[in-house]
Image (cartoon, rainbow, N blue to C red):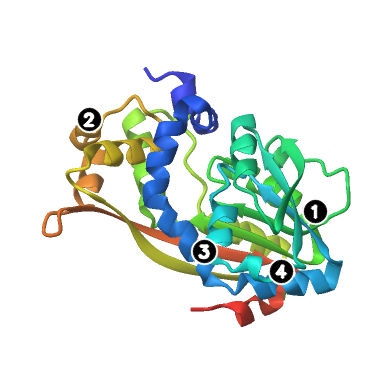
Amino acid sequence: MQSDTQTDTFKRSCRHWSEAGRGGMEAFYRLAATDYRLLAEELAWLPVFQELAQRYGPEIRLLDIACGSGQFPAALLEFGGLQQDPNLAVKYSLLDPSDFSIRTARQQLAGPFEPAEEHLCTIQQFQPTTSRYAVAWAIHALYCVPERELEVAIDRMLAAVETTGLGFIAHASQQSHYVKFHDRYLQSLGSDQAVPFSTGEQLIQVLQAQVDAAELQYWSIDYEGRVDLDDRDTAERYLQRCLFDDSISLDSMLADPHMGDHLRSCIDASSGMWRFPQRVWLIFFGGLAKSISDYKLR
């Protein structure tokens, strides 16, 4: 019988967002870094922030929901060209149920991102005490929100964003390796109580019921996470992080009747690589979302 901690997706996630889980986190981002670079290169982010500055003044308030280790702001600083405007100032607030995540993400911030408020909670628990934010985003952040709580999570996010501001969610599709592999892991656990990851399609459906169609824009991007077949340590740690379970070895995953077939489909023997196909939804809402495609670079 599996423990409650193992079958509870949120508890597994929280256990890994800690100093003890740093090794798995770093291995995961050796592959997932491609994703964050693509997100940073998808839009002309500097003009987006400049438009927000025109609407809300020189200091833009931003809320990063389930900030994790700050991979997205780091990618924007490297690939988004935000430092080109010396007048741009973004008051960057961090929200996460993990103090480790908040501390780690805070270390990634540099101009024009200026550390601001910290909220140690989930988005479902969030009760804003100040004015709304010009921007609120959740970048690969809502997977552990159970389907029954997605409406509450989106309600909180909508309440946090200025009416003419911008909400942004990046979230894997049900067709992505990330979601498919986790589903097969839960099948292996054999628990009716195990909670699957939420999907981008579910989030779009919730938003469609709550947001005017003109203020909801979304599209998907496809890419692969790749690692050498010979680099078993990185592959194992990456896959463990996909599951938030470092108790299961790569050999055990491959031998498992549910996970093994999926993993073997990700092996490209001709190139000597693991190839993990991902599809990610980019979901924009709010007043600025009406014109967000004007800033699209691809």
Question: Between disc 1 and disc 3, whose residue precedes?
Answer: 3
The numbered mark at residue 159 is 1
Query: Residue farthest to the right?
Result: 130
Question: Between disc 4 and disc 3, whose residue precedes?
Answer: 3
Q: Amino acid at mark 3?
A: Leu
User: Is residue 158 positioned above or below 246 on the image?
Assistant: below
Element type at mark 3:
helix
- If the image is split into quadrants, where does the N terminus sit? top left
Residue at image mark 4? 49
Cα gap from disc 2 to disc 4, whole angstroms: 47 Å
> Which is nearer the eye, 110 or 123?
110
Q: Is residue 33 visible?
A: yes
Residue 25: % across, % down: 44, 38
> Which is nearer the eye, 141 or 31?
31
Cα gap from disc 1 to disc 2, whole angstroms: 44 Å
| Residue at image coords 15%, 59% | 271
Residue at image mark 3? 39
Query: Residue farthest to the left?
Result: 270
Element type at mark 1:
helix
Residue at image mark 2? 252
| Residue at image coords 69%, 42% | 95
194 lies left or right of 121: left
55 lies left or right of 275: right
Contact (Cβ within 8 Å) of mark 1 with mark 2: no
The numbered mark at residue 3 is none
Q: Nearer the viewer, mark 1 or mark 3?
A: 3
User: Is residue 56 positioned above or below 179 on the image?
Assistant: below
